[in-house]
Amino acid sequence: MINKKVNTVQEALQGVEDNMTIMLGGFGLCGIPENAIAELVIKATTNLTCISNNAGVDDFGLGLLLQKRQIKKMISSYVGENAEFERQMLSGELDVELTPQGTLAEKCRAAQAGIPAFFTPAGYGTEVAEGKEVREFNGKMHIMELAYKADFAIVKAWKGDEAGNLIFKGTARNFNACMAGAAKITIAEVEELLPAGSLDPNEIHIPGIMVQRIFQGEKFEKRIEQRTVRKKN
């Protein structure tokens, strides 16, 4: 029986070193691998290139790595609610590569599928297209985008089994699904870890073949970036 379970987050992150490129799932604070990010802060791993939709907020998630100056380059689709991210980008302290959100997702999915590059109309005629091959398809101009190359992908799922199969819950699926299997090594952090064979095959979102290590997180704060409630009448 295949068993990809590791007992601790420390064991899961073995081999993560300075100057590596790491994909991190999530959208803002939704579905981020909280335990793994906290451990990266403790490990003081530095000069990282991080690929994530955005960096969340200042004092949580990737914002903690930015505070400690552990990220040298951020590849994302927008700055979001992170004031420190914005400050470091505008001051030139942080190398930032902003990518259209759909393109970012497809660059992950292409890496996941083993596709080296693809053409997309997104970004044509803008700074995004600078230095990239341009071709016309069906009367519309497209630019060539390369799939990402990452050392590790760290994703977060609701449930998983010891064989690495994953089930996501609601919108927390987001970028986690396309990042799983899109790096040399994929680490899955899950809320509930079950024996292999416990999950209904019809409910599995990501098969275990795309995951090399899986562990159960100890706690999840699950912060909400912005919460708006209606005033009581």
Image (cartoon, helix red, strand yellow):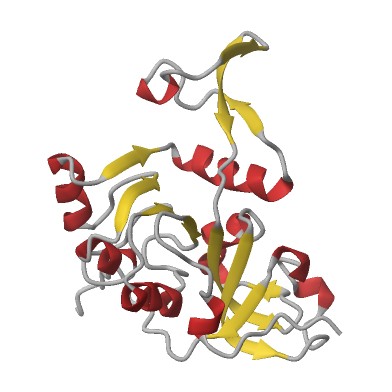
Return the x and y of residue 100 as percentages of the image width and height. Answer: 44, 37
Q: Quadrant of residue 214?
A: bottom right
The residue at 83%/75% (across/down) is 201
Tell me if residue 55 comes above or below residue 30 in the rendering.
above
Q: Is residue 64 visible?
A: yes
The residue at 39%/78% (across/down) is 39
Q: Nearer the viewer, residue 8 or 85?
A: 8
- Residue 100 appears left or right of 84: right
Return the x and y of residue 13 as percentages of the image width and height. Answer: 51, 74
- Residue 225 appears left or right of 135: left
Tell me if residue 162 comes above or below residue 44 in the rendering.
below
Q: Quadrant of residue 213?
A: bottom right
- Kindly give the residue lying farthest to the right in the view shown: 1
Q: Nearer the viewer, residue 232 or 87?
A: 87
Return the x and y of residue 68 as percentages of the image width and height. Answer: 22, 66
Return the x and y of residue 141 as percentages of the image width and height. Answer: 56, 13
Tell me if residue 118 comes above or below residue 129 in the rendering.
below
Q: Nearer the viewer, residue 233 or 83?
A: 83
- Residue 168 appears left or right of 233: right
Q: Nearer the viewer, residue 207 or 4?
A: 4
The C terminus appears in which quarter of the rendering? bottom left
The residue at 54%/23% (across/down) is 121
The N terminus appears in which quarter of the rendering? bottom right
Q: Is residue 226 visible?
A: no
The residue at 48%/67% (across/down) is 16
- Residue 22 appears left or right of 78: right
**Figure label count:** 0
